[in-house]
Amino acid sequence: MKDIAIVLLSGGIDSCVATAIASKQYQLALLHVNYGQRTESRELKAFYDIASFYNIPGNRILTANIDYLCKVGGSSLTDSNIDVQVANPDSKEIPTSYVPFRNTLFLTIAVSWGEVIGAKKIFIGAVEQDSPGYPDCKQAYYDVFNKLIKLGTKPTTCIEVETPLINKKKSEIIKIGVSLDAPLHISWSCYKNTDKACGMCHSCFLRLKAFKEAEVIDLIPYV
């Protein structure tokens, strides 16, 4: 029997490919977190579509709601008063799409669930190289979080966060996904729209650029 790995699956490219990677060695348990983001309904659809693609049983699918992040605000993804920025690849500033301390909250839920179901790994599709400077997408952050897991869980718990894509370029991630038959065609990346991707936000910019560099056709609809 394979060990269980929880995958934090937003429904985007990186988490979709992380799911494909984890599926080769582990029984998958998929976690999706709704936090009041603009495209919550569309991301949730992508999550369930990917879960269906991998035939994940219902007892290994978890959706969690932490919509208090809308009340916290501070991000264009959760605050309708803050515009979603058009991509600016030359900017050195952290974009308004950064959700304060979000990944820590996600990982905390994953560790809690992992202790209950006996998971050994938590996969997250964090990417440092092509990320727009998000502080919680750096390897040093995950190294420290793994130490926190050891200190904050039962002695019998053995859970470790895996970041298989952390040092990859987005175009490399596309190629890995293609090689693993990851269902990229049902993933969703847009920060703004839920029907057709805007093609202008930072996430769409990175996606379009990656598919172009990888010489792969992106099958999702754009405006």
Image (spheres, rainbow, N blue to C red):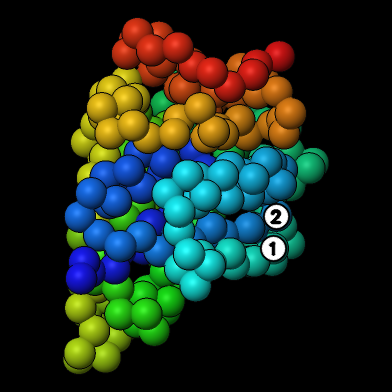
Q: Position of residue 108 (x, y in %)?
A: 43, 71
* Contact flag, marks 2 and 1 (Cβ < 8 Å): yes
Q: Which residue is mark 1?
A: 67
Q: Which residue is mark 2?
A: 36
The residue lying at 45 percent from left, 12 percent from top is: 217
- SS at badge 2: loop
Residue 105 locus on image (x, y percent): 48, 66
Disc 1, SS = loop
As drawn, the residue found furthest toward the right would be 81
- Say above or below: 21 vs 69: above
Left or right of 119, for residue 113: right
Residue at the (74%, 28%) spot, across then down = 195
Classify the position of the N terminus by image quarter: bottom left
Q: Amino acid at mark 1?
A: Asp
Q: Examine the image and state in which quarter residue 120 appears.
A: bottom left
The quadrant where residue 66 appears: bottom right
Is residue 21 visible in the rendered structure shown here? yes
Write the residue at 35% across / 39% down.
Answer: 17
Q: Viewer-proximal residue, 26 or 13?
A: 26
List x then y, in percent, for residue 124: 35, 52
> Residue 216 at what x, y percent from top left?
38, 12
Mark 2 is on which residue type? Gly
